[in-house]
Image (cartoon, grey):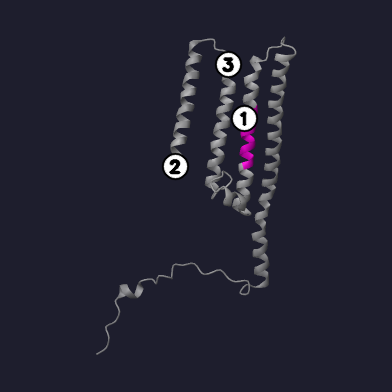
Amino acid sequence: MSDPAPSESSSKSPSPHSALPPAPKTPREQSPWERRIETALWNSRFLVMLAVVPSLLGSLMLFIVGTLDILTVVGDVLRYYLIDSSQDIHDTLVPDIIIAVDVYLIAIVLLIFGLGIYRLFVSRIDQAEVRYPKHPFNVGSLDQLKDKIARVVILAVIIEFFRAVVDIRFTTPLEAIYLALSVLALAAALYFMSLGHKDE
């Protein structure tokens, strides 16, 4: 007696390995031209160094500018209290410091961007991953990089907002109400941003 024919459903069921992509070719299996082209394509990732190096240089310049601004403020304070108090510094002291902090934050944005792009496209930074696995420079994807940069940018915008607030001179009670609503909106934005990263 002959064996029963396999059912249609069982004959069409895919094997567990049919959906897997084919294994990459080894260098010996590739043709010389294919190997050269793929090597060139893979080495093209070093093009991101055109963004990494200027970002790091820009960050360095901003750190220098921010530091010089702080040192200028320190010099003005010492001059005011030790040498000549004829020129009042209280109106410019806080805005100058806020501007320096804002410059530092933008420098940090460029630093995170440059090192994050290097890690994603060129090579991992071994020292950062071994010693400081949760360091901001250790990014696992472009979305994570954008998220970290967005946080620092939001802080920079808040600092810029408070710098503008310091220079405001209110003329009507309605302007004070607008300021209070703006501060409330910023506080709400910071609260919701902290909710999204409370597990980190």
Q: Secondary structure at mark 3?
A: loop
Tags 2 and 1 in contact by the CB under 8 Å rule? Answer: no
- The residue mark sitting in front, 1 or 3, is 1
Instruction: Report which residue position mark 1 lands on.
Output: 102
Q: Would you say residue 194 sits in the magenta stretch?
A: no
Q: Residues within 10 Å of mark 3 (few under 14, many from 20)?
A: few
Check disc 3 and report the residue beneath it: 168
Q: Nearer the viewer, residue 118 or 185?
A: 118
Relative height, residue 117 to residue 163 (above, below):
below
Residue at point 58% right, 52% down?
Answer: 130
Q: Give the Cα distance between marks 3 and 2.
A: 38 Å
Q: Is residue 138 above or below residue 27?
A: above
Residue ranking furthest to the bottom:
1
Near-viewer residue (21 or 84): 84
The magenta segment is 100-111
User: Which callout, 3 or 2, points to the residue nearer the camera?
Assistant: 2
Q: Residue 199: which numbered mark, if any?
A: 2
Q: Position of residue 15 (x, y in %)?
A: 39, 72
Name the amino acid type tagged 2: Asp
x, y percent for residue 10: 32, 74
> What secondary structure prevails in the magenta region?
helix
Q: Is residue 133 left or right of residue 33?
A: left
Would residue 125 be visible to someone looking at this image?
no
Q: Is residue 122 above or below residue 135?
A: below
Q: Earlier in the sequence, mark 2 or mark 1?
A: 1
